[in-house]
Amino acid sequence: MWTLTADDIDDLARGAALMGSGGGGSTRSAASLLRHQLDRTGPVTVVSPTELPADAYSVPVGLVGSVTVFEEKPLHGSEFARAVSTIERYSGVTCSAVLGFEAAGVNALLAAAAAGALGLPLVDVDGMGRAFPELEQTTFFLHGSPIAPVVVTDEKGAVMVIDGVDGFSAERLTRSAVVTVGGWGLIALNPQRNDVLARTAIRRSISRALEVGRLLGSGDLAALLHAYGGRALLPAKIVEVERSAGARFGRGSAVLEDLDRSGRLMRLEFQNENLLLLEEGQVQASVPDLICLVAREHNRSLTTEEIRFGLEVDVLTLPVAPQWRTPRGLGLVGPRAFGYDVDYTVPGGRR
Amino acid sequence: MRHLLGLADLDGVRLVGGAGGLDRDIHEVALVHAVAEIEQLHESTLAVTTSKGFTGYEIEVLARAAHSRRVVGLLVVGPLRVLRSTTRMCDRLGLPLIALEAGEPVRLASHLAALVQEPFTIAVRRIVAVTRGLPPAPTTADQILQPVSDGLRAPVALLGPDGTVLAGPEDFPLADVALPHHPRTVDTPLGHQVIAPVFVDDPVRPELWLAVALPPSHPLWLDGVAQLLKIAGFAVTALTARQRIVGEQDARDRSTLLTELMDVTQALGRHTVERAIRVGWRIDGWHTGVHLRLDNPGPPGPAATALVGRTLREHGLAGALAERADGWVLWMTSDTEPPSTSFRGTRRSVASAIGSIHDELPLVAGVGRPYEGRGGIARTVREAREACLFAGMTARNGRVEHIDELGARRYLARWHDSEAFSSYARTVLAPLDGHDVLLRTVQVYLDRESSASAAATFLGVHRNTVNQRIERVEQALGVDLANSDDRLVVQLACRVLNGPDGG
């Protein structure tokens, strides 16, 4: 158990952005939203699921949809309360804590804001371990725990309950609902028992985001990689970017040129998150592992929307939580799940 | 690859990278869409794929797989946005990446494959056309060479071991190279020559060669021609072997026919007469026989028979020719009895005939007197044989003997022939085996009327030496050379074994 204060927000935002692997949305407005929340309601208590009663329930919350729209059409403030009370009423379960279903990008910050707004502790776990685009790409679904009912709220007061469907359909229905209400929605997923969370969710998500953010902020990439077993691939300049229109999420490719002038080029494939890194046709890093472009100038991880010609970055890869590397896990979040006809590999044979 | 792009005439074709690899040979074209399919490809294949459904990174993955398989190039059909990473990679790997904006991949791959296979296809088509023109059982070499030459549209020649043209155009421009033991292509100022050996009797040493003079050509085509010459070579082998068999059969037939004719104890059957007529031999008329004996041991071969017949004809000696165990028999027939002086002319002609081929075929000959009719054939041939026995033995009488000039030696010829007497002679002289000096001495002595002085002079030794040797001979053989019978036996025995002049 520890306390998250306003002083941690910058580090948390930075760390959450890195854990987004290029996705998760711009953390800027979410950070200021959290700051306002903590100013109003004070620090947030962060607990591990084992510190909570095993048979009590925690509710996964977060934003689904366009973060860009969210920045322009922000929260009203009542969305968290409306979502959680609806799910409590609908499922008949009282939620005694909240967690982010995705403790990366804006959703790490929004989970903390939700905890503050509801006066509940924030559980130090999440369902993804990084940013993923779809709701079935959560540990809940991976371990057979239903994610429906899903409650979707918007800033105008709408409340929708989606139930009676499996994870894939829940994702599609949630997506359409969110598009219909204007581009984003605040959602609450089926409340999870704490002992199940302890066993199946990804642990220390908020703590890790904070630590990573601190190391990144101090510029100590080596320590960060050492602590989390990641690799720095090469210092690069972005020399070419191509985005394709019409795809569901913003797809694109970028060419990165070695700053050390060795002539090496790497090719990055992204679709909202950074998903595949190739060098001369060979996979150097691949989803579900994290691929991050850290802007050298600001020690900040770039989202895919920010990728543009001329930026100088450090290309990093961090290992994803081990449960995603299983065959069932790879079926949900491996390269082929994103339409890349390559095998998941970690160069050097480490799996 | 470069050639193929030129040939294929594709609209809107763009080389994206890997220009360094454009000069590699292509042997195959294959359509692929996934990395797994590339892994099935052979080296020197051009891979064709479509960009439909591709983001762009797929090309890089395919190119990497293609490079590992040593694929010659990658042709991508369809819209393709190429990033710098793709271009740089293909340049660095030397893998040509070609983008074709619009097209139908299957038809394109098929068209390119046809172009790539073209030299091979053309070669096969022409070779098949030529072999179709080969007769199943050719009777002359020209019947083999003509279809080959027509099909190749080039001169074809059959050559002997020294490069002489045996069949085909006489002015065939043979390249100045050693005739090879395996099919070989030689570059010439006008193009190429393909030379292939033909093996007839000896599987290791060729006896004949087939050669073609071609204009500058594709290597696949030259290889095809070499294979074709191998096939034509088989036909030549079969033809030559058949001719030799026929020749041998003919020779055997003639030989047995002659034997039958000479066997005067048997009446002349109608069948024999027919055979003689078929072969062109005359039985009636006046016959003059010539027996030719080979100095080398062993029966003569068909090539030698052809040479002898040709040479005799060239010297005006035309007639029936048959092989014998030690050479040949020839008899010439005239309607009337030849004048008695004709033998000199005949002997001169025979001598000049054998003289002209002496280097290739060392022969000696005997000539018999002319006799009439079937019985005459036998008599004259026999006389010729007897005369022949003495031919070539001394420098004095040269290589041709005429029976008339043999004199008394003619009677001795019978003894020389006799197997019984030969073995008797060997028995008689057996104790002197290994003592060549003694043998020679006694023969010379007896030939000079038992004169020790004359013998000594001839041998270049002292008289006493001769006498000593004679004593030793008498002891060894257990004879008394003063006794006329003993003397005669020893003298004849020496003659039989060593010839008239002591060897």
Image (tube, grey):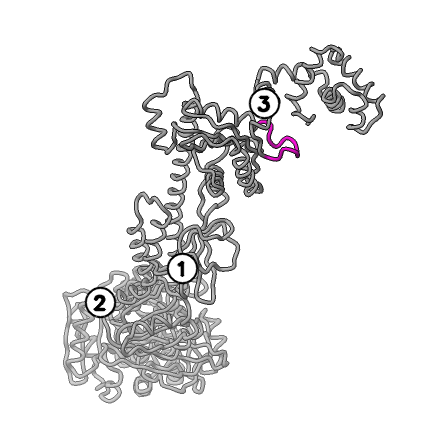
Q: Chain of mark 2?
A: A
Residue on which the image places disc 3: B410
> Which is in the foreground here, disc 1 or disc 2?
1
x then y, percent, for residue A279: 41, 72
Residue on which the image places disc 2: A147
Residue on which the image places disc 1: B222
Q: Which residues are magenta?
A: B389-399
x then y, percent, for residue A284: 41, 70
Q: Is residue A11 left or right of residue B461?
A: left
- Say which quadrant the N terminus of chain B sits in: bottom left
- Residue type, mark 2 in image: Ile
Q: Chain of mark 3?
A: B
* Badge 1: residue crowd in 10 Å (few <14, some 14–19, many ≥20): some
User: Do tag 2 and tag 3 residues touch (Cβ < 8 Å)?
Assistant: no
Q: Judging from the image, what secondary structure is the residue with disc 1 in?
A: helix
The residues bearing labels 1 and 2 have C-alpha atoms spaced at a distance of: 74 Å
User: Do tag 1 and tag 3 residues touch (Cβ < 8 Å)?
Assistant: no
